[in-house]
Structures are given as structure tokens and as C-alpha cells.
Image (cartoon, coloured by chain):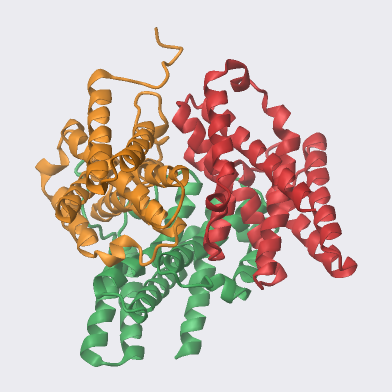
Chain colours: A orange, B red, C green
Amino acid sequence: MFDIVYLLEMTGIVAFAISGMLVARAKNMDPVGVFTIGFITAMGGGTLRDLILDNHPVYWIQHQELPMLILVLAIVFSYWQRAGRLPTSKIVLPDAIGLGVFSILGAQLALDLGHSWFIASLLGVMTGTFGGALRDTLCNEVPSIFRKDQIYASISFAGCWVYFLCQWLLENEALALTIGLLFIVIVRMAAVRFDIRLQRDPTQG
Amino acid sequence: MFDIVYLLEMTGIVAFAISGMLVARAKNMDPVGVFTIGFITAMGGGTLRDLILDNHPVYWIQHQELPMLILVLAIVFSYWQRAGRLPTSKIVLPDAIGLGVFSILGAQLALDLGHSWFIASLLGVMTGTFGGALRDTLCNEVPSIFRKDQIYASISFAGCWVYFLCQWLLENEALALTIGLLFIVIVRMAAVRFDIRLQRDPTQG
Amino acid sequence: MFDIVYLLEMTGIVAFAISGMLVARAKNMDPVGVFTIGFITAMGGGTLRDLILDNHPVYWIQHQELPMLILVLAIVFSYWQRAGRLPTSKIVLPDAIGLGVFSILGAQLALDLGHSWFIASLLGVMTGTFGGALRDTLCNEVPSIFRKDQIYASISFAGCWVYFLCQWLLENEALALTIGLLFIVIVRMAAVRFDIRLQRDPTQG
């Protein structure tokens, strides 16, 4: 199980880093800005989770291959023209995997440290979404997770509860993790595909 | 004494959460955004204080009824039209109570941990004002606490020193807390009522 | 050695605080805003470093003369007209010294706590640049360290590696610190003087 989780986590980090780098390129930032925004998007949620839970050392200090990977990605993105022109649509699936992996693993860590389901779900959502919120704030935009044109954080929240319920009903950690993760990935892909929202904008027909 | 403090703290949290939710509604955010901005406005200052003072677990992890309360408020605010149209003027008094309670309790915690009056006053101001500053930054506005059209952080700072002096002169914790709190609430209400500022804008007559 | 390091650190803090206060004045903030932005610019990087490394108490709580100094500076800047009109060009040298001192001392602290060169260089860059990034974010601008019109964070990164190499080759801590610091200050001044960039903007001839 561990290897699959690690592989998925890596996929999520790469997807989140790339989503940050695409925004940084669009804002015409230099290679350092591309690395920094990529790093913050991929690591911001987990760092906040570790600080709030007093879980030291922070995970990217323990796994320094992760910031190294982001450094390599940033160099590729800054100097290889084709990477910089990657359309955003290509990263929807890996981004959904990242959201799923980060949310469920964040919630799992909080449970392991003895916190309640409710607190664990809040920390799962933070881990999954805070990096993207920081990316948008640093790039001077209202965070896209707060905008009505997509659902994102609420899928993460629901996925954490699916994971808790499965853990409670099935008493099988690996299976519960998998179901929670698949729930988030599938619902997120469906929400993008069918344009599902929590609330219609009253100004639009 | 404890029950009154807890009641006042609850009032402050509700007031801060509502002030965040009103801004989030004005920015046309969805229910998740409304919850998140409300949560950050109410909890941001205390979370920063606990992280800087290494005071774990962070207070809303210890008191999970507080984030639950904010979740309920966010649902009310998002789906009940009348709540969303609450005029900002209605929250000036509870917001002033929140500023007072958070500032004085933040300063008290720093004193309890053995820090000096000066450091405690800085942490009091952080606890009282940082949530609102995060709210404005995430909503992509220059934080209103920095603008010349109101005094806010300086009242919090002065109130902390009123509290320290009373504690030193009266040697009665409950009385000192009450006087510091009343000082902040009354001066803040007076500042709003009579439009008192630290510095006049030179471009205005 | 200690006294020179402390003097340089003080220079860096004053320079960073002043750079924040100049931006705050330009945004027409009141004295509280001027203090807050000055404080965050000078202390933000070191505070983030201490939180991520779990290094408590945070350094400005240990050295409360530093926030006091910033308070005095903020009063001078807010009420003494000439200080508020200080041209930005005057702070390029002290700002470069601040970047150098903060980067090298941040990296040194991470090494002392047993982390690798790569992690130490990331923390050095954070310590050196995060305060300025927070300043720009709070003032609602895309952080200048990410813009193509200057190199800043990459000089900090390179300087950390110069320091590590000298430490390894020369086995003399004081000499390695000095060379790393001078490298950052000189390259930064040269970059400003000769308008050196990492990447040319393709839209400009």
C-alpha cells in the first residue's frame, strides 16, 4: 500500500506544482518566481497542516527529494518553451488526484494524532486546498476555490467523510483510503465535466 | 469569571465570522468560500498567536465547537437570503467586543507564558486584528486596518497597556481584564461614532 | 565575530523595515499600518523560518529590542515628513546587506539543526525574501521578487551555496559567513547597477 500512496502523493505534488507554474508563467514571472509559486502550491497545504498539528519536521524537510523534484520542474518550465504552453485542461486529472491524495492523507494524519473526525476533515480540506489558495493570493487574484464557478473544497470535505465512514464500517484502512480517494477524484472530474456548482449565480439566467 | 469570558469570546468569534461572511457574500463567493473566509477571520489571529507562542494544540482544535458554530453560521448565511443582506453597521458592536476580547486574552496568554509587557501587547494586537487582515488580503483588498479612515489596531494596542497597568496597580486579574476590555469596546465605538483618526489625510480638507 | 553579525543583522532589519514603511507610506497607510508593514517586512522571513524549523521562542520574542526599534522607526516615518520622502534608491545598499545577512544566517541555523545543504539553502532564501513577499502581498501587489525586472531570490540561493562551499573547503565558519555575505551584497549591487536579469522579457526588444 505504501508505495502506491507515495506514487499518488508524487503525482499530486507534480500536478499542484505544475498548476502553480502555469499561473506563474501567465503572470510573466522569472524562473525563481516559477519555482516559488510551484513550491508553495504543492507544499503550502501540507506545511500549514504540519504547523497547526505541531508535526515536526515538516514533511518536505523529511523528504527533500520533493522540493528537488519541484526545482527540476521549474527549470524545465522556465526554459523549455513547449512546457510553458501546456494547456490547463491537461492537468485537471492529476490535479484531482492531488486534491484526493492530499485531503485523505491530511485527514489521516490528524486522526493518527488523536483528533476528532470533524477536526480531521478541516485539516484534510486545508491540506488539499490551501496551496492553491496561496498560489492565487500571491498572484493577486481572488482564490479560485472561493469562486462560484467550481466546486473544489466541498468535494475534499465530503471525501474526508466518505473515508471516515468507510474506515468505521469496513475496518480496513487501505480500502477506506482508496474509496475516499476515488470518491474525490471521480466527483471532481464529474464536476468539471458537467459543470456542477453548489450555488447558481443569480445574475446568470 | 470564566463563563463570562467564554461568552464574550463566543460573541467575538461570531461577530468576526459574520464580518468575514459579509465580505465573502459581497465578493459573490460560494458557501465554501463563505465558511472559509468566516473561519479565517474568526480564527486567524488566535491561530497565528498559538503558532508563534508554540502553544499547542491550537485553540480551535481544543474547542471544536467553535469551528462547528462557524460551519452552521456559514450555511445560514449562504442559503438564507435575509442574513446575507445584514447591513455592516449591525456588527460594529459585536466586532468591537471581539476586538476587545481577543486582544486582552491574547496578551494575557503571552504574559502567562512569561513574556514581557511589550511582547504581550504585540501578540494581543495580532490576536485581535490578524484575522481581519487575512480576510481583506484573501478578498484581494488592502487590509482595512491599515487604512487611514479608521483606528483599530492602535485601540487594541492601547487597551493591552490599560490592562497591564490595571493588573499592576490593582493586583486583581478579573478587574484588570474587565477594564482593558471595556476600554477597547468603548473607545472603538466612540471612534466609529465620532470618526476619530490617527492622522488626517492631507488630500482631504 | 558575534558583534559584527549582530550589527549587520540590525542593519538588515532597519533596511527591510524602512523598505516596508516606504511602500506603506506610498499606499497612504496610517502609523499603525506603517509599523505593521515595517514589522512584517523585517520579521516575516525569520518568523516563517523559526516556525518551519520549530525553533522557539521565535527570534523577535527573544530579542524584543528589535520590534521596539521598528516601533520607533514607524513613529519617525509617520510624523517626520522628510523621512517619508526618502527615495527608494537610498535603501538599495542596506537592503542588499539585509538580504545577505538574513539568507546566510537562516541557512546557518538550518545547518546547525542538522538539515542538509539543499534544505538549508531553501530556508536561507525564505529568511531573506519572504518578508518582502509578504509586504507586497499585503499591499496588494504581485511580489517584486517574482518579477522579471530584477534578480533577488536567486542571488540569495547562490550565496547560500557559496557559503556552504567555503565552509567545506576552508573549514572556517567566520570566513565562510563573510564570503557568502559579501557575495550576496556585491552581486545584488551589481545586478541593480547593470540591470542583470535571469530571463529577458520576450516582449521587449
Q: Quadrant of residue B66?
A: top right
Residue C47, image x, y percentages: 48, 65
Is B180 located above or below residue B138 in the figure?
below
| Residue at far top of view | A205
- Which residue is at 41% across, 75% downward? C101
Q: Is residue C39 visible?
A: yes
Residue A16, image x, y percentages: 25, 45
- Which residue is at 53% across, 76% downward? C10
Question: Which part of the image, by quadrant, shows the N terminus of chain C?
Answer: bottom left
**Residue placed most toward the observer, B168 or B153:** B168
Q: Is residue A75 left or right of residue A122?
A: left
Question: Which part of the image, by quadrant, shows the C terminus of chain C?
Answer: top left
Residue C33, image x, y percentages: 62, 51
Residue B81, image x, y percentages: 58, 16
- Which residue is at 53% across, 62% downward? B56
Is C14 located above or below residue B176 in the figure?
below
Q: Quadrant of residue A165?
A: top left
**Residue placed most toward the observer, B61 or B180:** B61
Q: Is residue C18 visible?
A: no
**Residue placed most toward the observer, C106 or B168:** B168
Q: Quadrant of residue A36?
A: bottom left
Is C17 located above or below residue B79 in the figure?
below
Q: Is residue B52 left or right of residue A22?
A: right
- Which residue is at 35% across, 70% downward? C124
